[in-house]
Amino acid sequence: MRGPFDPLPYLFMYGPQNSGKSIFHEAISLLVTGGVVKADRALTNSSDFNGELANAVLGVIDEVNIAAAGPNVYNKIKEWTTSQYISIHAKYQQVYQQRNCLHFVQTANYRDNCPIFPGDSRITAMYVGPLIEEIPKPTLIRALIEEAPHFMTTLMSLTLPTSDTRLRLPILDTAGKEQAAESNKNPLEEFIEESCYEVPGAKLLFKEFFSKFCESLSAFELASWNKRKVRQNIPDKFPVGISSGGQLYLGNMSSTPMDVPPGTPKYVSKGRLIKLEE
């Protein structure tokens, strides 16, 4: 309300039906004269038409499984959540740019309806449990309308904290978000996390890595992971290179625990993967 151009986290609320998730965006629509729009089509359509998002302040995705539309949805979320400008492409009209005042809230019954991947820094996911006591919706709406001016007074007079991140509010890492990200890991990411160690200066023969990775796959998965695909999906922190002897290696990786070379930053173990201490 007070900083419409400040980027905010993408809010994802999931939980059982009739738990009050949708009333969040419905209540916000009572506080403003416009700008609350449905955004699921803009996120999921392959033609990239998004005219409904022009001048929108809150894009609502209600009970739509946008994750089923593929990885392009997540790319749009990443861009529209943090970019200062957004390109508007209404059907049969010229594409134009405007200042981005768009923020998102998604509600769903299932956790996997939102595309959350490891390392995500834009989405805050939260579980909404069942109601303890249900208020009839017409009664609730009347109460919200009556409360709206008092609520708006509080919003406009509240002391706002400063932010040290690219988003106006920090991302909260919830258990639900971590579980959703874990479920979206591909077999290669899971194998590296469970069976390899990140050690600066170490190197691992690629054919040894590939052989052990193939052993971890099912017959169905094995058909879709050849050497070329594995090389293309190796994380950048493990550089791939050819030694003077003509052998292909993965850098900074070991299949066994190793002592960290003297003079390097302190490393700590997190599960099976050794990472820099923050």
Image (spheres, rainbow, N blue to C red):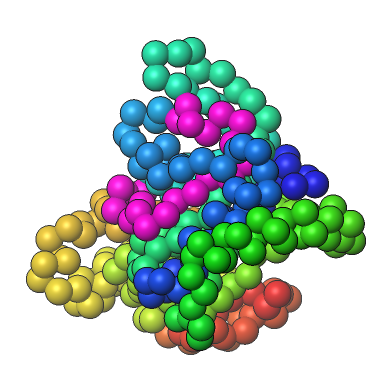
Q: Nearer the viewer, residue 10 or 38?
A: 38
Tally the numbered discs. Answer: 0
Assess whether residue 226 is covered by the magenta stretch: no
Residue 143 position, x and y percent, is: 64, 64
Is residue 70 rendered to the left or right of residue 40? left
Residue at point 59%, 73% (across, down)? 173
Highlighted magenta segment, given as a residue range: 50-71
Residue 51 position, x and y percent, is: 47, 27
Q: Quadrant of residue 226?
A: bottom left
Q: Is residue 201 visible?
A: no
28 relative to 207, above or below:
above
Q: Nearer the viewer, residue 262 or 145?
A: 145
Quarter of the figure with the C terminus: bottom right
Q: Nearer the viewer, residue 236 or 23?
A: 23
Assess whether residue 62 is covered by the magenta stretch: yes
Q: Quadrant of residue 193?
A: bottom left
Q: Is residue 135 visible?
A: yes
Residue 216 position, x and y percent, is: 22, 77
Residue at the extreme left of the image, as rendered: 219
Q: Nearer the viewer, residue 215 or 132?
A: 132
